[in-house]
């Protein structure tokens, strides 16, 4: 079994909790609240900025042109393509995208980006990939699950969001990341593999908590006091 197949199997519990989370199911039924959607976009816009920065760190540690090209393309994908699902949510709630940008990250999103930054700064290349992989992988599978469960047509309010993440592009991103991690894992000692497994699991858990954060509109205690 490939190393990433093992990671997927070990974390199936969290994947299932993500598929069944009320926010994710609310995308499927179209009934997720507007407040939760706005909260999600605010956090996700900043999260994706951080994600591109981490791809940049991975790029700077790459030796092969093929890997440099991969990380470059992924940054481009987030910048130019991954805005479409955000636009889908913004159009649905009738809120201007720009007004949801530049907000401070709620605790869980803050934790998640700092977790990835930690592995990017302190860990090996394979640890970075382990921390990054649940991001495209969980969304790819959410897209596929919602496609299967709800079979949305073009009239579904989140047709664009669901078809974006179920698409071949996200499949390809995930596949390429897995391929790179599987190659690195072949030469990794057990200790290093355990660090990757830990980084991967924590990212899966933080993906789940990110949905919960948006669903409950999580905020910092007494946040207004700091921001005023
Ligand atoms: C938190 C989070 N994880 C994964 C993705 C998919 O890129 C996203 N947009 N946001």
Image (cartoon, helix red, strand yellow):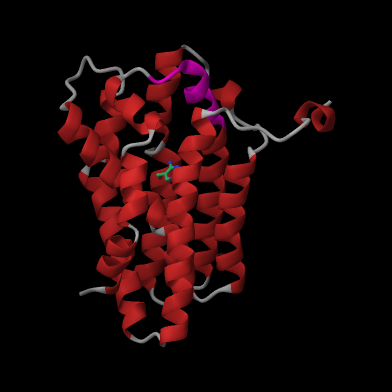
Q: Position of residue 227 (x, y in %)?
A: 80, 30
The residue sitting at 41% across, 88% down in the picture is 189
Q: Please determine whether, in this image, residue 149 is positioned above or below residue 14.
A: above
Query: Magenta: predominant secondary structure element?
Result: helix
The residue sitting at 22% across, 14% down in the picture is 155
Q: Position of residue 8 (x, y in %)?
A: 29, 61
Query: Can residue 158 be found in the magenta stretch?
Result: no
Q: Position of residue 183 (x, y in %)?
A: 30, 78
Kindly tell me whether residue 108 is visible in this rendering: yes
The residue sitting at 59% across, 60% down in the picture is 117
Kindly tell me whether residue 41 is visible in this rendering: no
Q: How many numbered markers are drawn? A: 0
Location of ligand 1 given as a quarter of the image: top left
Tell me which segment is drawn in magenta. 32-42
Q: Please determine whether, in this image, residue 214 is positioned above or below residue 134.
A: above
The residue sitting at 20% across, 19% down in the picture is 154
Residue furthest top as drawn: 94
Q: Within the image, what quadrant is residue 181 found in?
A: bottom left
Q: Within the image, what quadrant is residue 1 found in?
A: bottom left
| Camera-nearest residue between 221 and 87 | 221
Query: Can residue 41 be found in the magenta stretch?
Result: yes
């Amino acid at each position: 079994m490939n190393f990433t197949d093992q990671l997927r199997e070990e974390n199936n519990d969290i994947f299932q909790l993500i598929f069944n989370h009320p926010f994710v199911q609310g995308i499927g039924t179209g009934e997720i609240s507007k407040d939760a959607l706005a909260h999600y976009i605010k956090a996700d816009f900043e999260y994706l900025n951080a994600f591109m920065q981490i791809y940049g760190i991975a790029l700077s540690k790459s030796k092969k042109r093929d890997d440099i090209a991969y990380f470059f393309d992924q940054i481009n994908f987030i910048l130019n393509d991954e805005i479409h699902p955000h636009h889908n949510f913004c159009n649905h709630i009738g809120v201007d995208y720009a007004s949801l940008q530049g907000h401070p990250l709620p605790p869980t999103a803050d934790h998640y980006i700092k977790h990835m930054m930690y592995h990017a700064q302190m860990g090996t290349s394979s640890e970075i990939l382990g921390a990054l992989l649940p991001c495209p992988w969980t969304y790819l599978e959410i897209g596929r699950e919602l496609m299967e469960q709800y079979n949305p047509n073009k009239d579904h309010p989140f047709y664009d969001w669901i078809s974006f993440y179920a698409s071949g592009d996200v499949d390809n991103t995930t596949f390429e990341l897995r391929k790179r991690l599987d190659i690195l894992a072949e030469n990794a000692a057990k200790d290093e593999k355990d660090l990757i497994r830990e980084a991967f699991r924590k990212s899966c858990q933080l993906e789940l908590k990110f949905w919960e954060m948006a669903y409950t509109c999580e905020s910092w205690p007494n946040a207004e006091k700091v921001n005023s």
